[in-house]
């Protein structure tokens, strides 16, 4: 088995893709975002319920897609629950940097200055598979959209 | 069988009393000598192509040596991620034999010039080779006249040409364009755009669960409002081979014009426009061993002559004043600007190569690979194959319970196996089957059953890797 493949599909990632956490429709969601990746047909429906102090009280998703997009969404929902809007936003930026790469130096500085990414760092293997970055980013594109609104339903696409 | 196929492919060609444009083409054979090869970019129009045949690798009993043919494709001999390359993405694009690469190199090293205008030697050579390529394409698909071949960038541009030139002139509000549910986006979106411009409607022949079209509904769908019936010859996702000649005969009975998308058939099986009886036929060079950026539109002479230009510019005019212009006859009326000269020459070289093997032999070989793949797929757990169980093109789309097409494709790539995962420019068809996408293995004559065996091993490993623990 190739090392790159093992880095991309770590056991934790495969586990999240087989048994996604926080999966299913969110009743009483304040914001609902439908995201899709038209190049491969992956889709996500992300529901967020905001709590006091601008926190993301509840985050759930449904949809279908490859192991990377499903695991990324599952791990994301676990990470975002309880975070404030601005913390969620900062995590989104850090995650984007993680999966799009950059120089090794930048990457290591991201890793050290953003310990809050935690398990999400397991998805850094995507870096070596540029065609799969959109898969990992799809749920985060949906969050970015969700954070830009206080209520309602909207759509987002990796191709727009 | 092979011998019969070869005999069929050397049947004396139709006469080509063509070139009604302002220059004269010499009816001579134009043979380029290059290293140990003899490359014909401009074959004689009234004789078979012995040079092309003699280059084909054959075994002692004169049958095709399929394994040895691989040596003509340098790209196949490489490691990808530490494994020997297995290229099963031929429906997307095929590899190019050395003879095509040599023809391109020879053109740029010896004959490069603009066509149709120059009065110097190189321009004559380039023009002769370019127009010779047109004759070669005409002959290859059984067109009565080289004037019926318009060079385009490929299938997509060919179809857009018809949508603009024919559609703009003949389609009226309330008319119907009949398509099928299995069309590639390139044979769907141009008609959507045309329908919007003209106020016309689209209608579709449904796809059945087995991947074939609902043939019994065709008579009902072909009403007098149908002005055009455009359909694919071979489905790029399902491998289905549609009965093109039947479709064209039925369409003609209601006065509808027909367009055949031959992108997946032109390089894989005998395709003859007169046997099919179509008005238009479109295909791409790069899916049949030729270069990218070149393809052709066949249009029946009478229809092409009735069409206005679609692109304006040099090459397509007779005279120009500040206010207006007059246009050349087809095919040059539809070829504004400097054409893809090298591409056309490369396409002709690809045709020489394919005819050296024989398209009937290629079809037989490809079909054998597809059948072998279907048999072996049946051994895998949680495997669902799309498309007809019977005769099909060398395309097998499938889904596996254990893994999403994108994960499967990434996994395979790491083992040197090039598959394609996704919707294959067939989004409506994927929706029809309730799938986000499929994984597709598509073969060509240089592929082998041993490569299919390795694919099965890789897919079995993928099942273990991604499947439930």
Image (spheres, rainbow, N blue to C red):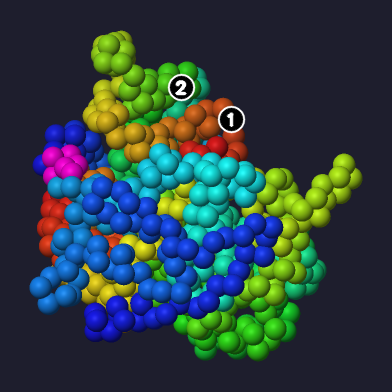
- Whether callout 1 and callout 2 share a subunit is answered yes
Disc 2 residue crowd, few under 14, some 14–19, many 20+, Cα 10 Å: some
Pick the residue in front: B392 or B268. Answer: B268
Mark with earlier residue (1, 2)? 2
**Residue B81 inside the magenta-drawn segment:** yes
Q: Give how far across and how far down residue B353 sits, in percent.
A: 33, 62
Question: What stretch of residues is rendered in magenta?
Answer: B78-83
Q: In the rendered image, which residue does mark 2 sit on?
A: A89
In which chain is the residue bearing label 1? A
Q: Residue at x 39, y 81 (%)?
A: B11
Pick the residue in front: B421 or A98. Answer: B421
Q: In the rendered image, which residue does mark 1 sit on?
A: A149
Locate the C terminus of chain A by quadrant. top right
Q: Give how far across and how far down residue B445 sits, in percent.
A: 26, 65
Q: Residue at x 43, y 45 (%)?
A: B107
Q: Residue at x 30, y 16 (%)?
A: A103
Query: What is the count of numbered marks?
Result: 2
For the residue labelled by badge 1, is the local secondary structure a helix, a strand or a loop?
loop
């Amino acid at each position: 088995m190739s090392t790159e493949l093992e880095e991309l599909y770590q056991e934790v990632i495969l586990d999240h893709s087989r048994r996604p956490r926080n999966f299913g429709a969110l009743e009483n969601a304040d914001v609902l975002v439908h995201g899709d990746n038209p190049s491969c047909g992956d889709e996500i429906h992300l529901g967020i319920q905001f709590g006091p102090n601008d926190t993301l009280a509840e985050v759930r998703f449904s949809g279908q897609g490859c192991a990377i997009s499903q695991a990324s969404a599952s791990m994301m929902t676990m990470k975002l629950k309880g975070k404030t809007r601005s913390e969620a936003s900062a995590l989104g930026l850090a995650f984007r940097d993680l999966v799009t790469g950059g120089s090794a130096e930048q990457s290591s500085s991201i890793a050290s200055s953003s310990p809050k990414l935690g398990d999400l760092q397991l998805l850094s293997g995507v870096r070596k598979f540029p065609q799969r970055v959109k898969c990992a980013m799809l749920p985060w594109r949906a969050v970015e959209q969700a954070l830009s609104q206080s209520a309602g339903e909207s759509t987002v696409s990796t191709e727009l | 069988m092979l011998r019969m196929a070869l005999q069929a492919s050397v049947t004396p060609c139709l006469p080509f009393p063509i070139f009604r444009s302002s220059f004269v083409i010499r009816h001579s054979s134009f043979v380029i000598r290059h290293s140990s090869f003899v490359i014909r970019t401009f074959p004689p129009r009234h004789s078979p192509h012995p040079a092309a045949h003699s280059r084909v690798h054959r075994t002692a009993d004169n049958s095709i040596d399929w394994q040895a043919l691989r040596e003509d494709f340098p790209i196949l001999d490489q490691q990808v991620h530490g494994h020997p390359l297995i290229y099963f993405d031929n429906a997307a694009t095929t590899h190019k034999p050395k003879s095509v690469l040599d023809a391109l190199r020879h053109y740029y090293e010896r004959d490069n010039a603009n066509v149709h205008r120059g009065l110097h030697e190189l321009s004559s050579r380039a023009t002769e080779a370019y127009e010779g390529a047109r004759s070669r394409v005409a002959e290859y698909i059984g067109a009565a006249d080289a004037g019926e071949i318009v060079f385009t960038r490929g299938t997509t541009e060919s179809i857009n040409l018809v949508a603009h030139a024919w559609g703009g002139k003949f389609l009226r509000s309330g008319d119907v364009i009949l398509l099928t549910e299995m069309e590639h986006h390139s044979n769907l979106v141009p008609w959507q755009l045309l329908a919007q411009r003209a106020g016309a409607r689209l209608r579709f022949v449904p796809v059945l669960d087995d991947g074939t079209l609902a043939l019994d509904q065709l008579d009902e769908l072909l009403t007098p409002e149908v002005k055009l019936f455009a359909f694919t010859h071979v489905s790029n996702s399902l491998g289905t081979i549609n009965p093109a000649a039947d479709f064209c005969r039925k369409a003609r009975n209601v006065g509808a014009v027909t367009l055949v998308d031959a992108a997946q058939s032109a390089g894989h099986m005998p395709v003859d426009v007169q046997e099919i009886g179509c008005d238009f036929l479109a295909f791409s060079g790069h899916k049949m061993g030729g270069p990218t950026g070149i393809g052709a539109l066949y249009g029946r002479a009478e229809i092409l002559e009735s069409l206005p230009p679609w692109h304006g510019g040099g090459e397509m005019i007779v005279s120009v004043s500040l206010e207006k212009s007059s246009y050349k006859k087809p095919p040059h009326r539809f070829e504004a600007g400097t054409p893809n000269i090298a591409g056309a020459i490369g396409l002709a070289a690809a045709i020489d190569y394919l005819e050296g093997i024989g398209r009937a032999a290629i079809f037989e070989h490809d079909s054998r690979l597809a059948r072998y793949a279907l048999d072996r797929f049946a051994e895998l757990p949680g495997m669902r194959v799309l498309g007809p169980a019977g005769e099909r093109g060398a395309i097998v789309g499938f889904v596996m319970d254990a893994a999403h097409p994108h994960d499967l494709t990434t996994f395979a790539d790491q083992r040197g196996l090039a598959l394609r995962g996704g919707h294959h420019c067939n989004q409506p068809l994927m929706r029809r089957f309730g799938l986000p996408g499929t994984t597709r293995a598509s073969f060509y004559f240089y592929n082998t059953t041993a490569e299919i065996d390795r694919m099965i091993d890789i897919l079995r490993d993928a099942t273990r890797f991604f499947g439930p623990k």
